Image (cartoon, grey):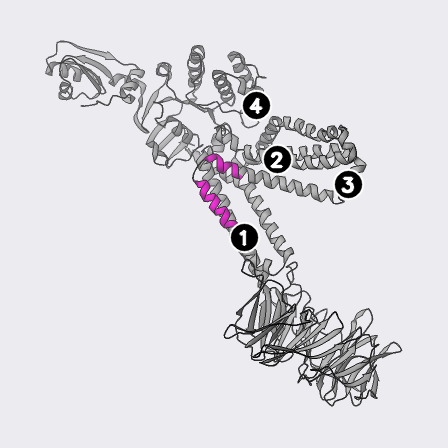
Amino acid sequence: MTTLFSIASRELREKKFVFGGALIVALLPLFAALMPASSRWGRPAVITLLGSILATGFALALATVLGSSTIGRDLTDNRLSFYFSKPLSPAALWFGKALASLITIFVCLGITIAIPATLAYTSARELLPEDVGAIVLFVSIGAVALFALSHTFSSMLRSRTALIVVDVLLLVGTVYALVLLLGPILGAGAMKLTTRIASGFAIAFVVLLLVAPVWQLSRGRTDRRRSHFELSKFVWAGVVALLLVTGAVVFWAVNVSPNDLAQPYASALSAGDWLAVSGDAKNRADLRPFFFANRNSGQFVRLLNPMVVNASRNGRFVAWSEAELGRKAAFSVKVRELDGGRTIDTGVYANTALSVLGLSDDGSRLAIFNRDSLTVHDLQRRALLASVRLPLGSGGYNDHLYFVTPDLIRIFDLERGNQLTVYELDVPRRAVTVTGKKELAPGVHVSWMSEDGSRLMLSDWRSRSGTILADARTLQTIADLGVIGIDAHVLSDGTVAAIKREAGTPHLRVVNLRGEVLRDYALSGDGAYIDAEVAPGKLVVAWAKRGDKRSWTMQTVDVASGKTIHSITGLHPTNLLGFRGTDPRMPAIDARPRVAESADGVFTWNALTGEKKKLF
Amino acid sequence: MNADTPAIRITDLTVRYGRKTAVDGASLTVPRGSVYALLGRNGAGKSSLVRCTLGQMKPTNGRAEIFGSDVWAQRATLMDRVGVVSEEADAPPEMTVHDIATFSSQLYSRWNQSDVDARLRRFGLDGRSRFGALSKGQKKQVMLAMTLGMSPELLILDDPTLGLDVVAKKSLFEEVISELADRGITVFITTHDLGPVEAIADRVGVLKDGRIVLDEEVETLKARFRRIRFGTQPMALANASLVAATVRQWGSSGTEAVVTNYDDVAFERFRSSANLTTADVTPMSLEEIFIAVAGEHEGAQS
């Protein structure tokens, strides 16, 4: 340690003239401010801005110069023998010299910042950002990195050997390997995680470069060529180790399971045992993976960055679009059969994020509604069956489509939020027909559609406009139910259930198709909604008190008697943001245990038996 | 550590730079308390051998030891006991003489500042002078003064007279090295200045084309080398079992040979077998021996 400080103090004495240089640089803004032209911007502002630029530039330039000369100049001038003929270790030699250089850089940075900042204190406070300390820290780290890089490149160049070609090739290879390694998380859109891993690699790389000269001097000593060889050997071996660690971290990060989600969100597919699950992954910054998970077997399919996801109505097939890095198009569409299938690249690419996907029940056909165009693909033959333009189509987030038959597609296009248009595409004829059109009052949406796709319910989420049961193809009114409440569902017996709020309390109201109230049961809490009919006449509703998440309660109500069959507090039906079936048809009876969530995770709750089971 | 352990032991040391072999399997031993002079022409491999001996360069093959320790592995520890004056004065040019002394004093465990000051005064050097501003000879003197200040047990001098004037050279050999030798300090010196070396060296080694072609006590060496001039064909030498390092002929029968295994009995046998009436025998200086051994003439025959 003593020798280290001896070397450092010797080097500092040698470099003390640099402090004079820093003083001149620090005063330059003052001289610039004295020039007549500077009065246009205000002298304090000139001092502040020019001082900031010069301080940064001087520190970085000094780091580069000192890095390239600290050992490199002694090596080329054959003066390293001066140190190696003395009882001092390579570590003391390098760290002593490096310490002196870094002190020089930081003191100069301090001088070049402090003087202009003092001269124009008020202006500096106004013009410089609040986190100026973070900027100075960033510049300091940059200076250290430049110092280390500069030493490395200088040692390599000064050796004048062909090994430099190998170094360049390895550098290119390293950058390529790093891009490949970060590709999966970059493709997953996890910019924070990518930045963290890349920053970790960069910091470790700089540390490696700061330590490497000890090996370089220890093994290469005064021999310029051997010095380069040993430095390269250490650096590239270290880089390989860093790449392996980075690869391991990326592997760990992307091999995430539903159980690794900090707060999982899930939605059951419209049929079958599979769920769509997503949420922020633990300890993985902003990585938000998406899963299809089987509620019984625990199997899951992981998608790192799906843009649009949809499943066939029978829950057997799923389709999604995902970003493609460095490929011919920005997005591609993949399809998978969930039970035992493998992911198939459909060969369908797009340069814009796709909006709506639809899959036929046999998974053989894929429909894409994007902007104003609708394309239909035969996935087995990888053939485009139809590509048509919809006259008023928007292909937006609120649109729906489904295969009525493999040759007939129905599209619900909500234009400007209130113009609902129904199209039908006859695939063999490639003919588009507008089968229905309706102007919707504000807040009116499709709250229910029959399992066969023949009828739909239009209701107002604000409960101001009336609820209408309409023909799903023509949008002709079948029954105008009046203002019966929100979330209207047609039950298996043909009556309609809705939630109506009265005197601050939600009520489950059952009406006939004339809108006549048949039953009315007061629920608890401040708000409620209908989840599903799980058996004939057995309806699951969920309610909660305003502002109290823990008050969420799911209860199975016998519609005929109004009695609660089962209830559970602390759970509410799941609502996975970003996942929605574009196929709006709902099963008449959904006897599957309800997928529900709480702060503790995702559960299934059997609304007929009251059994609760944790999934994730 | 055993007191019989040599100060330096070099074993089968080879240094290669790519395809070029600078030192080729060199082995030598420098006993403690001796003065060893390693001689060789420019490019013979002296500097490479010295750098390996100082642990500044890793040999391609072989090993160099100082005081019984591998110098490559133990360099930092060993250098506390070894004083070095390099061929090129290698101190940073920005340092003053005083700075160099201060810096060195912090590194060595047995630093003697008064010795350094006295030596600098004798050399007439100003402590405030920048090292880079000194002449070649003055730089060498500074380095020598510093080296002596650390009270070495072994002094390694790589061509120390390069750049020194005649007075300084005389001072170096007659005062410094002789004094150190008298104090029992081992001296390993490479030089072109053979005259003064002859007076102080106990042993010499000659490096030629990277190989040690001679490694011997000076007295023994001088005893077995003779220049013989005679008036017959050189084959006569072989008949008398005298080995010639170099042979030169002039006219039809004039021959001058440098004999490497001279002794009086063999010479008499040679003179009588060749029926020579006149044959001059002259002793040789170290310089002459060096030229005969390491010079360009390759006409050795036996």
For marks 2 and 1, the one nearer the N-term is 2
Judging depth in this view, the residue of A469 and B101 nearest the camera is: A469
Please state if A425 lies on the left or on the right of A221 as rendered: right
Per the picture, the main secondary structure of the magenta-coloured stretch is helix
Residue holding disc 4: B94
Q: Chain of mark 1?
A: A
Q: Chain of mark 3?
A: A
For marks 3 and 1, the one nearer the N-term is 3
Residue holding disc 2: A61
What's the magenta region? A152-177
Residue holding disc 3: A127
Residue holding disc 1: A178
Q: Residues within 10 Å of mark 3 (few under 14, many from 20)?
A: few
State the SS at label 4: loop
Residue type, label 2: Ala
For the residues labelled 4 and 3, the Cα–Cα distance comes to: 42 Å
For the residues labelled 3 and 1, the Cα–Cα distance comes to: 38 Å
The spot of residue A521 in percent (x, y) is: 83, 84
Same chain, marks 2 and 1?
yes
